[in-house]
């Protein structure tokens, strides 16, 4: 590949205004033909808006500036226009229909028809199989999409893009929901497609994967282009500095543990699959957490991390659950969520929007949701006290919102997470289980979340952090358990925990 | 009313963020506009009343007609209260009309055929309604069958049982005290006057209570540092409401006084308004409708809440059946026909969301009144039942479409 490659895409001085807000200001991005171009920025920096302008979701005329695609100024009226030119965007939330087959999804609204205008199923399935081979997915094209995992669904999306003869593939946080193995496969596929001449734009938070695949990186902050860095000059420090506008010397706040008495002990915890009680999902787990201690649980996707936490928290997951739970040395029952909360447990979910928040209600009522009885006076909820409580959390947690009466659905991911944490802190638990506490949150807000976790530990609470990002666990925990196939395969104090050692434990298979 | 106002709007909060406020005047204006948008349904009621008082040459607002409006719609409003709660939780109840008919028939057996005292008949009938609710609530909450199916079955089951109880005949001529529930007036107890002093007295007390409670709420909010509306606007709104209540009471006083149905309704609105706004149970209903999973993982006993919602709906459907039977002085097989549709319409016109999580008791009452005024106004104008149906359908569709449009415009989805 030579240096004089032409630009396939030039976005020149794009400005996009919403009533009262300038979402993009003079953003300029040049993407060369055949490269993988990463776009980085904090949540709300304008990445998604930019991609919506590019793909025609915001049609020509609603923005200022020019989009030049293959040396031609283009004016897309909708997504179909941009797809006709070969620009395909794959959103973070996949747009697949779960009850249709892989092949049906690939050719949705692009159906292969026979002579009578009816769908030619043989041809459909045959061509789908060929596309699946190109993306390296070994599945039958007639399999229903709901029966395959998220990682494979992502590949189906890419196959769908290929069926549209894609020239420029845009992936919005493609690995956000994938485990390491699936992520690797996907990143390799992007590199493989590059060899076939397909240009990609990848939007990502994950700096290590950007380093792995990107030929150049454009950083956007507050709706403006900061700079475009070419592959050789990319360092994590530089990208982070561009993204947050300041040096982030420490990505993890300092944390001096003051570890006290044992606060939680779980013995012989076993849970089975809710639909298929013969499958053991959590297998004889024994863990302890002491007051003031931050304990990590590391495991690959499907290792049973969330399953363990949710089965422990009021049997919210699984069937045929057995085991014993001790809080402060006393055995307690956690058969319902209410019982678990009463006995000092709290669980902040990995999926805020589906399991954590009432998005159509305000911050105040979300924070009080798990502890309304604390606000009761004469049998009624004390509105004023609730407002005060919510306001004090807004201040102490630095929740950015015009008021506590703002709907949580309108907050950014980081602020939503702070609302979830406020809710659980207000319930005053002994042990907080935080499942992926920083998923989908930008770098600055992550630091704040870590500081909150440290503060809680300093107050003498026991903290369990479940995370798929090893650096995060290594950065904030005092001790880490490794989980594989539902079993605890090892336990390392932070001094001995290295990514290599943990990975070895995380991939340890059951003796058969 | 009160829960229409205390439901916070984020429109004002978000508006203040997007359009930086330049001075006090624009701030006030934006507050008033936000308030008007929030109380759009109330304004719609006023418009419908104005429209029909013009179209009917003022007949609509004659004292006797105003009194009739309340009495004729009482049972729909009672149902609307229970229905909006069920809808907020993300369910629906199609059986209420049949349950009302069934309980009406059963009450006929108690009060007429068995000759039980009127108060015992009423208590037993409400208990039957509660049992119906237990039955439906069990299938919905604990077995997990969608409410649409369970109550569709209930619609058939209880209509059938009503016919069984009636045995192909009407049961009629109820005791006077029982009948008071549907067409009695408080003056019957205290004697007749030209201008009923009791009605005016109660209205005066209600207005004073409204002022005191609103001022106390406002003061409490201020003391907690919560933002409050401009004082002038606050007072203006209170005065407007007070004048409306006063005129309404005056109209009733020149006729026969306060209908018993209105007293029942007022008590229900007060109780349920407080339950939905201020009690833990009410908060749990909103939380379940807003996000069932999040509610469950916050320790809310979602099944119990759902179960009790349907028990409550059963009791209110029974009460509606009693009021209707009392009014007609007859328990018949066609009683309650289509009540469920009017109650559901009332809830949706009143701003409840099909997906759940959104709605107010006050909104449902106003929605029910809009339907009532439409019914009444068109009847006075001599418009046939066929066109009345069509118009009501159209109003429901437009009301919800307007709501959807409003939400989309404000950016929430």
Image (cartoon, coloured by chain):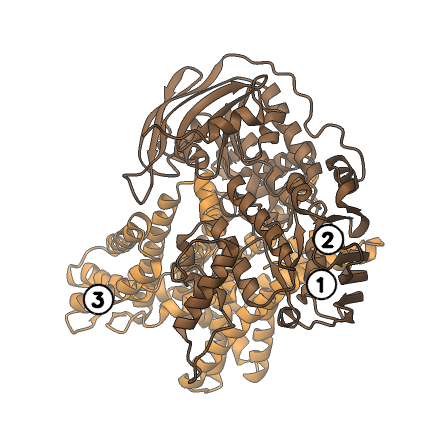
Chain colours: A brown, B orange
B159 or B354, which lies in front? B354
Q: Name the residue carrying label 3.
A: B162
Tell me the residue that label 1 is attached to: A53
Q: Is B355 drawn above or below residue A510 in the view shown?
A: below
Q: Name the residue under label 2.
A: A46
**In the rendered structure, which disc, 2 or 1, sits on the residue that comes first in sequence?**
2
The chain identifier of the residue carrying mark 1 reads: A
On what subunit does the disc labeled 2 rest?
Answer: A
Tell me how far mark 3 sits from mark 1, CA to CA: 62 Å
Same subunit, labels 2 and 1: the answer reads yes
Mark 3 Cα within 10 Å, few/some/many (few <14, many 20+)? many
For the residues labelled 3 and 2, the Cα–Cα distance comes to 62 Å
Residue at the image point whose x is 41% and y is 15% from the top = A329
Please indicate, yes or no, whether residue B60 appears anywhere in the rendered image.
yes
Q: How far from the left and from the top, in percent, is residue A351? A: 52, 43
Q: Whole-percent x and y of residue B3?
A: 55, 53
């Amino acid at each position: 590949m030579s240096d004089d490659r032409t630009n396939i895409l030039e976005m020149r001085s794009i400005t996009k205004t919403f009533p009262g807000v300038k979402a993009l200001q003079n953003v300029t991005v040049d993407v060369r033909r055949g490269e993988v171009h990463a776009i980085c920025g904090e949540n709300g920096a304008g990445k998604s808006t930019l991609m919506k302008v590019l793909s025609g979701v915001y049609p020509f005329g609603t923005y200022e500036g020019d989009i030049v695609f293959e040396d031609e100024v283009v004016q897309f009226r909708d997504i179909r226009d941009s797809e006709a030119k070969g620009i395909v965007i794959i959103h973070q939330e996949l747009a697949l229909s779960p009850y249709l087959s892989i092949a049906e999804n690939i050719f949705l609204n692009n159906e292969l028809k026979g002579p009578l205008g009816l769908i030619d199923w043989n041809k459909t399935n045959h061509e789908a199989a060929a596309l699946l081979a190109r993306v390296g997915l070994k599945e039958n094209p007639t399999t229903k999409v709901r029966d395959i995992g998220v990682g494979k669904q992502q590949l189906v999306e890419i196959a769908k893009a290929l069926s549209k003869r894609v020239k420029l593939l845009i992936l919005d946080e493609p690995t956000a929901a994938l485990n390491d193995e699936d992520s690797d496969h996907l990143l390799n596929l992007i590199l493989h497609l590059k060899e076939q001449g397909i240009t990609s734009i990848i939007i990502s938070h994950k700096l290590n994967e950007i380093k792995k695949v990107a030929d150049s990186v454009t950083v956007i902050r507050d709706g403006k282009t900061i700079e475009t860095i070419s592959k050789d000059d990319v360092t994590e420090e530089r990208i982070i500095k561009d993204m947050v506008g300041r040096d982030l010397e420490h990505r993890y706040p300092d944390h001096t543990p003051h570890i006290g008495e044992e606060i939680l002990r779980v013995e012989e915890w076993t849970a089975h699959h809710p639909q298929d009680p013969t499958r053991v999902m959590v297998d004889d787990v024994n863990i302890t957490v002491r007051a003031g201690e931050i304990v990590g649980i590391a495991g690959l996707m499907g290792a049973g991390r969330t399953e363990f936490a949710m089965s422990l928290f009021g049997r919210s997951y699984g069937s045929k659950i057995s085991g014993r739970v001790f809080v402060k040395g006393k055995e307690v029952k956690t058969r319902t969520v209410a019982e678990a909360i009463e006995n000092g447990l709290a669980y902040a979910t990995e999926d805020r929007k589906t399991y954590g928040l009432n998005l159509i209600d305000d911050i105040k009522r979300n924070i009080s949701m798990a502890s309304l009885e604390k606000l009761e006076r004469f049998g009624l909820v004390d509105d004023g006290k609730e407002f005060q409580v919510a306001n004090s959390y807004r201040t102490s947690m630095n929740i950015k919102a015009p008021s506590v009466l703002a709907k949580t659905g309108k907050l950014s991911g980081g602020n939503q997470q702070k609302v979830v944490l406020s809710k659980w802190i207000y319930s005053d638990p002994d042990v907080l289980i935080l499942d992926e506490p920083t998923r989908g949150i930008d770098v600055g807000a992550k630091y704040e979340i870590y500081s909150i976790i440290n503060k809680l530990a300093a107050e003498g609470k026991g903290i369990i952090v479940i995370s798929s990002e090893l650096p995060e666990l290594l950065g904030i925990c005092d001790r880490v358990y490794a989980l594989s196939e539902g079993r605890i395969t090892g336990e390392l104090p932070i001094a001995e925990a290295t990514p290599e050692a943990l990975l070895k434990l995380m991939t340890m298979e059951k003796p058969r | 009313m009160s829960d229409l106002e205390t439901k916070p709007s984020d429109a004002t909060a978000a508006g203040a963020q997007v359009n930086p406020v330049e001075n006090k005047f624009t701030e006030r204006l934006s507050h008033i506009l936000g308030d008007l948008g929030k109380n759009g349904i109330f304004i719609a009621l006023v418009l419908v009343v104005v429209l029909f008082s013009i179209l009917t040459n003022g007949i609509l607002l004659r004292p006797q007609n105003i009194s009739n409006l309340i009495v004729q719609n009482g049972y729909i409003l009672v149902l609307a209260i229970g229905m909006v709660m069920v809808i907020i939780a993300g369910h629906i109840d199609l059986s209420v009309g049949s349950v009302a008919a069934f309980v009406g028939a059963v009450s006929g057996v108690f009060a007429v055929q068995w000759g039980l005292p009127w108060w015992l008949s009423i208590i037993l009938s409400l208990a039957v309604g509660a049992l119906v609710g237990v039955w439906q609530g069990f299938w919905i909450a604990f077995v997990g069958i969608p409410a649409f199916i369970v109550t569709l079955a209930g619609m058939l089951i209880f209509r059938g049982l009503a016919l069984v109880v009636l045995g192909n005949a009407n049961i009629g001529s109820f005791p006077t005290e029982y009948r008071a529930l549907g067409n009695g007036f408080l003056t019957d107890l205290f004697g007749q006057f030209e201008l009923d002093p009791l009605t005016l007295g109660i209205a005066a007390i209600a207005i004073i209570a409204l002022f005191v409670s609103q001022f106390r709420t406002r003061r409490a909010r201020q003391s907690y540092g919560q933002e409050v509306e401009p004082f002038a606007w606050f007072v203006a709104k209170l005065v407007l409401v007070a004048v409306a209540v006063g005129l309404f009471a005056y109209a009733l006083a020149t006729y026969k006084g306060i209908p018993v149905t209105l007293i029942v309704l007022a008590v229900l609105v007060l109780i349920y308004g407080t339950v939905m706004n201020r009690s833990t149970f009410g908060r749990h209903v909103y939380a379940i409708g807003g996000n069932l999973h999040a509610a469950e993982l916050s320790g809310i006993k979602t099944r119990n809440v759902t179960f009790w919602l349907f028990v409550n709906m059963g009791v209110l459907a029974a009460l509606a059946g009693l009021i209707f039977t009392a009014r007609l002085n007859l328990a018949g097989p066609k009683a309650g026909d289509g009540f469920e549709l009017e109650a559901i319409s009332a809830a949706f016109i009143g701003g409840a969301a099909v997906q759940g999580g959104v709605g107010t008791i006050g909104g449902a009452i106003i929605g029910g009144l809009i339907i009532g005024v439409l019914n009444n106004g068109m009847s006075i104008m001599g418009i046939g039942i066929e066109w009345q149906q069509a118009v009501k359908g159209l109003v429901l569709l437009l009301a919800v479409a307007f709501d959807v449009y409003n939400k989309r415009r404000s950016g929430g989805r």
